[in-house]
Image: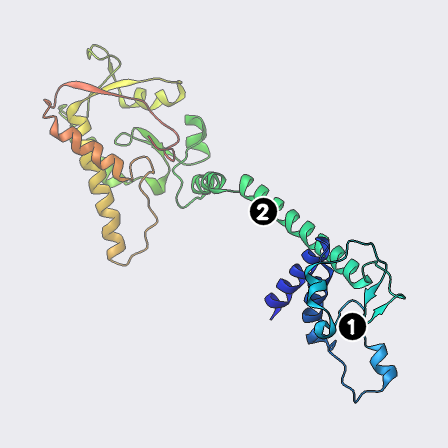
């Protein structure tokens, strides 16, 4: 019902603006019928009938249809009353209700335009791009999911309780590490003590200790070199780390550990698959890497 009334309101207002008084008056009459403005029956007293007469709503039953088709070109200050007779007491000015409705329509259009502008600005500054950034920030700063360790090794140790994880090539907080599995990894290398070799140069002429490698996190853009065998075992390590976490979930236990975002996606798995297809000798030094403090960022 509201939609129908609004439609008649817009039509009537448009006809009024386009100087079509006859059609406009009929539209206003239809719009006002639900509010009690109808043709007055003969049973009502004459004074009541006159009081309820709507001057700008003519009764076309007594009007000449030809006069509707060919309106007079002579200017006139007369309007047609509801009984169809011309009445010189009615001026050509639009009734007050039309002015009121016109003002209301303009106000409504202004409100809609303002709302549209506000909605556009909201989407501009809070759209999908900004939502993605806010999700990443909440991931980074959430203590249950973030593997962030600050901006220096000192901050990593003192503020975030991070330790260097040689399989991750990064400093990690406790909930991002699997220390028993890491111990297995660090004793699976080709050295006599089971450790892995690290080198400062590709020719493997300058070896590095694990402590020296961990300290590279404080050196901007520092890199070092590893063997192909280390790279293969790194992939195996993360497959096992993911499996162990999934096993805890299946057992219904509380899982307070996570895999770093940089390695916990399908992209890293595909990278490892391509690595295995190379069939490179395990002892070859072909991997270059750096040490990170922020494992929330993707590779």
Q: Quadrant of the N terminus?
A: bottom right
Vertical relation: 152 (above or below) 35: above
Kindly give the residue lying farthest to the front in the view shown: 66
Question: What residue lies at 77% left-to-right and 61% top-to-bottom?
Answer: 98
- Which one is nearer the viewer's eye here, 101 or 213? 101
User: Are the residues flagged by discs 2 and 1 in contact, CB closer than 8 Å?
Assistant: no
In the image, 76: left or right of 195? Answer: right
Name the foreground residue: 3 vs 67: 67
* Mark identifier at residue 232: none
Q: Which residue is mark 2?
A: 119
Left or right of residue 116, residue 137 in this image: left
Q: Residues within 10 Å of mark 1 (few under 14, many from 20)?
A: some
Question: Which tag is nearer the camera, tag 2 or tag 1?
Answer: 1
> At x 26% / y 36%, what residue is drawn?
267
Q: Is there any visible trace of residue 68 in the rendered image?
A: yes
Q: Residue furthest bottom?
A: 43
Label 1, secondary structure: give it.
Answer: loop
Q: Position of residue 66 (x, y in %)?
A: 69, 64
Q: Is residue 184 visible?
A: no
In three-dimensional space, the C-alpha distance between marks 2 and 1, rounded to whole angstroms, equals: 50 Å
Given residues 142 and 97, the one toward you in this image is 97
Q: Earlier in the sequence, mark 2 or mark 1?
A: 1
Location of residue 57 in the rendering, given as x and y in whole percent from the top left corner: 75, 69
Can you say whether 160 is above or below 290 in the image?
below
Location of residue 142 by image quarter:
top left
SS under mark 2: helix
In the rendered structure, find residue 84 and report the number of the disc placed on it.
1
Q: Position of residue 215 (x, y in %)?
A: 36, 21
- Assess disc 2: are there few (<14), some (14-19) or many (≥20) residues with their C-alpha within 10 Å of its C-alpha: few
Q: Is residue 167 above or below residue 264?
A: above
């Amino acid at each position: 019902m509201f939609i129908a009334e609004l439609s008649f309101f817009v039509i009537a207002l448009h006809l009024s603006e386009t100087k079509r008084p006859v059609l406009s008056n009929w539209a206003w009459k239809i719009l006002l019928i639900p509010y009690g403005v109808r043709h007055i029956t003969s049973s009502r007293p004459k004074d009541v009938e006159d009081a309820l007469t709507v001057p700008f709503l003519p009764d076309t039953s007594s009007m000449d249809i030809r006069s509707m088709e060919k309106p007079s070109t002579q200017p006139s200050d007369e309007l047609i009353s509801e009984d169809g007779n011309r009445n010189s007491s009615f001026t050509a000015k639009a009734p007050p209700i039309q002015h009121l409705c016109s003002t209301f329509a303009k106000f409504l259009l202004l409100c809609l335009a303002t709302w549209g502008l506000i909605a556009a600005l909201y989407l501009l500054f809070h759209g999908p791009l900004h939502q993605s950034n806010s999700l990443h920030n909440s991931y980074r700063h959430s203590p249950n999911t973030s593997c962030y360790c600050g901006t220096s090794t000192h901050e990593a140790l003192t503020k975030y309780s991070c330790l260097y994880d040689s399989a991750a090539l990064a400093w990690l907080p406790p909930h991002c590490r699997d220390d028993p599995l890491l111990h297995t990894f660090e004793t699976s290398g080709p050295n006599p003590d089971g450790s892995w070799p690290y080198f400062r140069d590709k020719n493997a002429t300058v070896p590095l200790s694990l402590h020296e490698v961990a300290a590279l996190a404080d050196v901007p853009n520092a890199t070092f070199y590893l063997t192909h065998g280390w790279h293969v075992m790194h992939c195996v390590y993360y497959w096992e780390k993911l499996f162990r976490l999934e096993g805890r979930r299946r057992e219904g236990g509380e899982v307070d550990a996570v895999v770093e975002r940089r390695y916990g996606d399908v992209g890293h798995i595909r990278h490892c698959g391509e690595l295995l297809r190379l069939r490179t000798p395990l002892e070859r030094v072909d991997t270059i890497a750096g040490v990170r403090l922020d494992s929330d960022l993707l590779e």
